[in-house]
Image: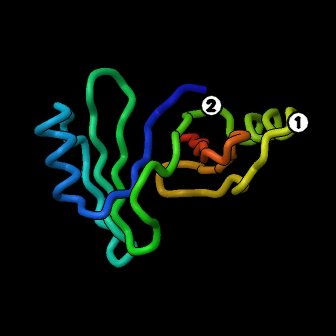
Amino acid sequence: MRIKYTTIIVKDMGESVRFYTEVMGFAVESRHDLGPAGTITLLRGKGETLVELIENPVDGPGLYSVGMEVEDMDATVEQLRSKGARITMEPRPITVGTLAFIEDPNGARIALIQHH
């Protein structure tokens, strides 16, 4: 497992993108329009880890989750479950692969993602 991205829910995508590019020095990797569900902007700094900004009508602003890339979703989820991890969303297909969520003991969300 390795950290792939950190997801932040934003209240104003334009303002947030300006901050991360002009102030923090990140570059826009890609943008995704989800229609009424919102928008996603992926930003890259140095290295491989991304910052994912999401603006949507549902979630309030703030840190949403840390995304961990996994090689084998089913094996990883079963291993984590056997060690007592709280699975908050069972694996489900998404556009780019498979996604599941677990929580750490403090309630922090950890997204597990296996890309195609």
Residue 92 position within the rendered picture, expressed as x and y whole percent measured from the top left: 65, 57
Residue 103 versus residue 44 in the image, above or below: below
Q: Are marks 2 and 1 in contact (CB under 8 Å)?
A: no
Residue 97 versus residue 72 in the image, above or below: below
Residue 24 position within the rendered picture, expressed as x and y whole percent measured from the top left: 20, 33
Between the C-alphas of marks 2 and 1, the distance is: 18 Å
Residue type (three-letter) at the residue carrying disc 2: Glu
Residue type (three-letter) at the residue carrying disc 1: Ser
Name the element at disc 2.
loop
Q: Residue at (33%, 58%) from the top-left corner? A: 10
| Foreground pick, 2 / 16 | 16
Name the element at disc 1.
helix
Displayed quadrant of residue 83 = top right
| Foreground pick, 33 / 20 | 20
Q: Residue furthest top?
A: 47
Mark 2 or mark 1: whose residue is earlier in sequence: 2
Give left or right: position of 19 versus 67: left
Q: Residue furthest right?
A: 82
Give the number of the disc on residue 5: none
Mark 1 = which residue?
A: 82
Give left or right: position of 42 versus 111: left
Give left or right: position of 54 versus 59: left
| Foreground pick, 20 / 111 | 20
Mark 2 = which residue?
A: 71
Residue 88 position within the rendered picture, expressed as x and y whole percent measured from the top left: 72, 55
Displayed quadrant of residue 77 = top right
Residue 38 versus residue 20 in the image, above or below: below
Q: Residue at (36%, 46%) from the top-left corner? A: 52
